[in-house]
Amino acid sequence: MYGKCGSIDDSEQAFYEIPERNLVSWNAMIGSYAHQGLADMALSLFQDMLSWGEVVPNYVTLVCVLSACSRAGAVKMGMEIFKSMEERFRIQPGAEHYACIVDLLGRAGMVERAYEFIKEMPIHPTISIWGALLNACRVYKKPELGKIAANKLFELDPKDSGNHVLLSNLFASTGSWEEADLVRKEMKDVGIKKGAGCSWITVKNKVHIFQAKDTSHEMNSKIQEMLAKLGNDMKAAGYVPDIDFALFDLEEEEKMSEVGYHSEKIALAFGLIVIPPGVPIRITKNLRICGDCHSAFKFISGIVGREIIVRDNNRFHRFRDRQCSCRDYW
């Protein structure tokens, strides 16, 4: 529970207070570390578990461990663990383990190798496996391979708008605006609607929800003032907006304005206004945090001296002193 809420310190305290730890508690703690981006701690705890010797890793344990390797960029270790699963742990690799390896290779920039790995798998590739490859293609701008992954996803899950949007964003990030527009048009033609991206923050048991460019909140004027102040402070500190994440065919000046009003930035501005100093600001986003917001939040955490925790649809990001727990590997 604490791990899923992003309270890793409380999670650790609960774990170490357990008088007799069983496999479930070990898995929960390893998984919590991996989900928080604390991959080194996840792998260290896994070694402690093996040294302790009273529990044997199971299917879930290896998913958590391989996920941690993926988030740490530990390609060699991840591949060694994967290859030793059957012989060392008597565990037959399943779809989740294969997806972790595709993600591991893809995150490390080894996108073509990830595709070759998929073609050599003894099981039929699942949605998560093709999804991991498509995401890697988006990060490393591999449109041709991205189209292959996307088409496989369209066959397996034709109504999922996320895959279409990811492919469109891949084309947009490489300047292929016509192809990006074509994907969006195809979505519209077959009746697939993109879910609205939003971020929310809870203050005194009330949830405040924001969308990009949102001006509907009752405190909008103060929020806009805070956004302007943060923008000036960040610029003075050397921050430059990453306009690659303004995925529209706009002029450069418009793109810089576009990324400045993403939903997570608006939620953060509101949080800085209403949440007392010293209290962490916790934001949840229904999509993956964009690279520009990730960079901006690092700057802001140092400027305002606050801890900012963002839970997106993939993992936690914990910003403190101009650094993120993911170490920019996400």
Image (tube, helix red, strand yellow):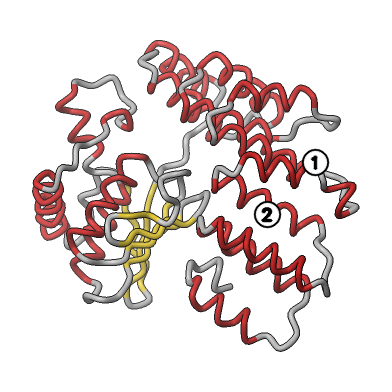
Report the front residue among 21 and 181. Answer: 21
Please tell me how crowded label 2 is: few (under 14), some (14-19), or many (20+) other residues with Cα within 10 Å.
many
The alpha-carbon separation of the residues under discs 2 and 1 comes to 13 Å
| In the image: residue 246, left or right of residue 60 | left
| Residue occupying the point 46% across, 30% down | 139
| In the image: residue 91, left or right of residue 329 | right
Residue under label 2: 65
User: Relative to residue 194, is residue 224 depicted above or below?
Assistant: below
Task: Say which amino acid is labelled 2.
Answer: Val
Report the front residue among 67 and 153. Answer: 67
User: Relative to residue 117, is residue 71 depicted above or below?
Assistant: below
Task: Say which amino acid is labelled 1.
Answer: Lys
| Local SS, label 1 | helix
Residue 76, picture quadrant: top right
Residue 46, picture quadrant: bottom right
Quarter of the N terminus within the rendering: bottom right
Question: x%, y% of residue 191?
Answer: 54, 27
| Residue occupying the point 66% across, 68% down | 28
Farthest residue to the top: give it: 178
| Residue occupying the point 50% across, 71% down | 8
Among numbered discs 2 and 1, the one appearing first in the sequence = 2
Farthest residue to the front: give it: 51
Q: Which mark is residue 83?
A: 1
Question: x%, y% of residue 219?
Answer: 17, 62
User: Relative to residue 74, is residue 321 depicted above or below?
Assistant: below
Task: Select label 2 or label 1 by which is in front.
Answer: 1
Question: x%, y% of residue 35?
Answer: 56, 57
| In the image: residue 232, left or right of residue 5 | left
